[in-house]
């Protein structure tokens, strides 16, 4: 069960209550960050991809995965990092795993970073491991990589083009990996046609945080997982 802890902004001294989110391990169990009730929140002066994630270990199956680090936005404009108990990998005991695969728990999208987080959570739900920022930056959007997979997240208001799909496919080919595209604004008609030819799964990111498959390869991936 998620816990709520008091959090005070060091800049404006405003008091908040933060409730830790729960995530689903691929085994079906819930993983919840363990928070330090007596620690002090720190202001985030510079956001970086690496510092925005923390490794949590599932108490049910022992698997360690990266999840968004507990953070809270203060109305004064400061982003607060909520202190965690013990080590960076601390997590509360997971509940009993559910079988078959559990229902996907989306992350609501408000910002470009939310779009990336929602995609990473969905890929973990599919069963991909070791999700991280891709070494090779795509021509547009943000690249993610997992074991055997290259993914592209496009959080802009421009529909993805055939060239975007082709570039992702070529990147995956050079790395001997599968690929998948996530777009907030959808795809041009030619991009759909090209993706079908190349076998690239296409998803549209709904603002609710649930990726919607929009072609055959995506339907298959959503149904079967990694």
Image: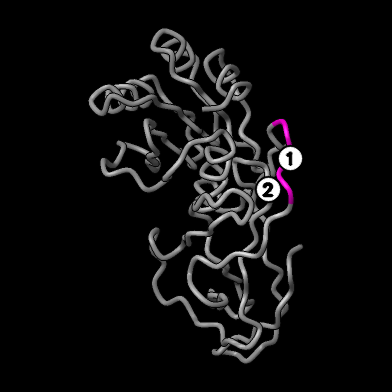
**On the rendered structure, is 102 left or right of 178?**
right
Mark 1 neighbour class, 10 Å CA radius: few under 14, some 14 to 19, many 20 or more:
some
Residue 25 pos. (x, y %): 61, 46
Residue 179 vs residue 194, the one in the foreground: 179
**On the rendered structure, is 139 left or right of 80?**
left
Judged from the image, the secondary structure of the residue bearing numbered disc 1 is loop
Q: Quadrant of the N terminus?
A: bottom right
Q: Residue, x 58% and y 17% (percent of image)?
A: 220
Residue 121 pos. (x, y %): 56, 45
Q: Residue, x 66% and y 83% (percent of image)?
A: 37
Q: Is residue 206 above or below residue 50?
A: above
Q: Is residue 133 above or below residue 215?
A: below
Tell me where the magenta segment starts and ends, as one range: 96-100
Residue 192 pos. (x, y %): 49, 15
Image quadrant in which you'd find residue 150: top left
**On the rendered structure, is 99 left or right of 135?**
right
Image quadrant in which you'd find residue 93: bottom right
Q: Are marks 2 and 1 in contact (CB under 8 Å)?
A: yes
Residue 29: which disc? Answer: 2
Judged from the image, the secondary structure of the residue bearing numbered disc 2 is loop
In the displayed orientation, state which residue is furthest to the right.
1
* Residue 98 part of the magenta segment: yes
Mark 2 neighbour class, 10 Å CA radius: few under 14, some 14 to 19, many 20 or more:
many
Residue 205 pos. (x, y %): 59, 36
* Residue 158 part of the magenta segment: no
Residue 177 vs residue 169, the one in the foreground: 177
Residue 58 vs residue 221, the one in the foreground: 58
Q: Residue, x 55% and y 89% (percent of image)?
A: 10
Residue holding disc 1 = 98
């Amino acid at each position: 069960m998620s816990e709520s802890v008091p959090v005070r902004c060091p800049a404006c001294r405003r008091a908040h209550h933060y409730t830790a989110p729960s995530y689903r391990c691929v085994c079906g169990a819930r993983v919840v960050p363990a928070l330090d009730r007596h620690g002090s929140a720190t202001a985030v002066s510079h956001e970086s991809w690496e510092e925005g994630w923390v490794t949590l270990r599932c108490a049910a199956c022992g698997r360690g995965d990266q999840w968004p680090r507990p953070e809270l936005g203060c109305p004064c404009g400061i982003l607060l990092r909520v202190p965690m108990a013990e080590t960076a990998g601390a997590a509360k005991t997971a509940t009993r795993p559910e079988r078959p695969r559990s229902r996907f728990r989306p992350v609501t999208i408000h910002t470009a970073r939310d779009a990336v987080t929602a995609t990473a959570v969905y890929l973990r739900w599919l069963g991909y491991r070791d999700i991280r920022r891709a070494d090779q930056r795509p021509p547009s959007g943000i690249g993610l990589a997992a074991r055997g997979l290259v993914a592209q997240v496009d959080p802009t208001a421009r529909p993805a083009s055939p060239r975007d799909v082709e570039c992702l496919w070529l990147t995956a080919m050079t790395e001997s990996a599968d690929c998948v595209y996530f777009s907030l604004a959808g795809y041009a008609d030619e991009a759909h046609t090209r993706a079908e030819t190349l076998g690239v799964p296409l998803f549209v990111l709904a603002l609710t945080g649930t990726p919607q498959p929009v072609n055959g390869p995506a339907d298959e991936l959503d149904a079967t997982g990694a």
